């Protein structure tokens, strides 16, 4: 934590552009038979039997990450995860990525090695090939843009637009923890500014901080659904927060939704830390982003297939569009879920 990237040794200019690309990518191996040509030519060559899905996400220093508390290795890992998550949200299998980076000369070869160690770790764990990219210098800061490629049978691809009234709304894992992890890190950064010798004690926040710095994309969920014989009617990954994502599904499917406060999955560490920060955990779960869980809808007839699965929570159901999108609170109040920032329950009830 709080490492200084300027301390390391080798300047980027010492390796030159081609030397640097070679140096950073030499450990990448090919795991997918659909990769016919990887790094080293003008373009990669891929051969997929089924439709391909393609998605890109860019992470910019100062906007999406802060290097004073994001170790570069974690950042590389996370940059891959946010992209794979979009592939899994299409109910597809991720197979390849390309990685483009721009950075200023404040970064050293050692710093980029760390970043690539995280990318490499993510690629081997998730069984995907890094098949290309681009490397360029920048006046200021670090940016990473990753494009992920995946594949799925046409009839299995799941869009945001397929939800219909009476479908169940299901979410994987638990929500809100990544946001509270960020709150903890931001607080520690402020403490560090005042007293640089302070040693942050993050032990009780380990889960939350990990959810923020090293999220996992839910590769297992499309696999689980396939095994259970469940084809979701609509699906999206939770990057901006539950409110925003259920609104996307509702708008794209032209339906409404009721979510139930008492069904929202929360980790005990999230509940305890929300209390400590005097934040309402429901508000955090609805609006905190970066969980990278999957939110999907299923036909009622599939309920028995997912019932009791520890990875999945049924949190509500789909309604007609005219009924709108609501949260039913523990006190049985019906509150509208809003597009930008669902403020607080008290305010909504006036
Ligand atoms: P070109 O000039 O044809 O764009 P480059 O010199 O940029 O080629 O890249 C050479 C090879 O290295 C290409 O296969 C490219 O995809 C790959 N590559 C370049 N930068 C990266 C990177 N940051 N990560 C992974 N592969 C990269
Ligand atoms: Mg290039």
Image (tube, grey):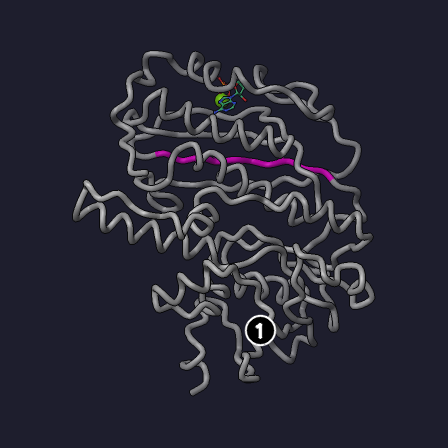
Name the image quarter holding the N terminus.
Answer: top left
Observer-nearest residue: 17 or 6? Answer: 6
Q: Main secondary structure of the magenta part?
A: strand
Name the image quarter holding the C terminus.
Answer: bottom left
Q: Is residue 345 magenta?
A: no
Q: Which span is picked out in magenta? A: 142-151
The image position of residue 124, as x and y in percent, is: 60, 28
> Helix, strand or loop at disc 1?
helix
Mark 1, Cα crowd under 10 Å, few <14 / some 14-19 / many 20+, is some
Q: Is residue 58 left or right of residue 324?
A: left
The image position of residue 284, as x and y in percent, is: 45, 64
Question: Is residue 55 placed above or below 277 in the rendered structure?
Answer: above
Observer-nearest residue: 5 or 64? Answer: 5
The image position of residue 149, as x and y in percent, is: 64, 35
* Residue that badge 1 annotates: 262
Observer-nearest residue: 77 or 156? Answer: 77
């Amino acid at each position: 934590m709080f490492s200084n990237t300027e301390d390391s040794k080798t300047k980027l200019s010492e390796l030159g552009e081609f030397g640097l690309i070679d140096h950073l990518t030499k450990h990448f191996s090919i795991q997918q038979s659909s990769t016919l040509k990887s790094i080293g030519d003008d373009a990669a060559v891929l051969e997929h039997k089924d439709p391909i899905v393609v998605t890109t996400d860019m992470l910019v220093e100062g906007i999406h990450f802060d290097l004073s508390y994001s170790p570069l290795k974690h950042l590389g890992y996370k940059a891959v995860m946010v992209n794979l998550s979009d592939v899994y949200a299409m109910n597809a299998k991720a197979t390849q990525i390309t990685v483009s980076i721009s950075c200023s000369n404040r970064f050293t070869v050692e710093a980029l090695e760390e970043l690539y160690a995280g990318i490499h770790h993510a690629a081997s764990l998730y069984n995907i090939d890094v098949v290309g990219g681009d490397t360029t210098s920048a006046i200021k800061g670090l940016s990473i843009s990753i494009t992920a490629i995946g594949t799925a049978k046409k009839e299995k691809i799941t869009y945001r637009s397929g939800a219909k009234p009476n479908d169940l709304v299901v979410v994987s894992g638990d929500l809100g923890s990544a946001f509270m992890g960020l709150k903890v890190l931001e607080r520690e950064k402020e403490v560090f500014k005042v007293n640089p010798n302070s040693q942050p004690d993050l032990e009780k926040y380990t889960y939350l901080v990990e959810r923020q710095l090293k999220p996992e994309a839910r590769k297992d969920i499309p696999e689980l659904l396939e095994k259970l014989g469940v084809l979701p009617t609509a699906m999206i990954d939770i990057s901006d927060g539950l409110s925003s994502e259920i609104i996307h599904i509702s708008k794209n499917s032209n339906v409404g939704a009721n979510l139930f406060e008492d069904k929202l999955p929360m980790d005990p560490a999230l509940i305890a830390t929300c209390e400590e920060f005097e934040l309402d955990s429901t508000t955090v779960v609805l609006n905190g982003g970066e969980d990278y869980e999957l939110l999907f809808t299923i036909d009622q007839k599939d309920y028995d297939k997912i019932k009791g699965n520890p990875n999945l929570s049924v949190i509500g159901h789909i309604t007609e569009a005219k009924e709108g999108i609501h949260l039913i609170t523990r006190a049985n109040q019906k509150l509208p879920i809003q597009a930008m920032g669902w403020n607080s329950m008290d305010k909504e009830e006036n």
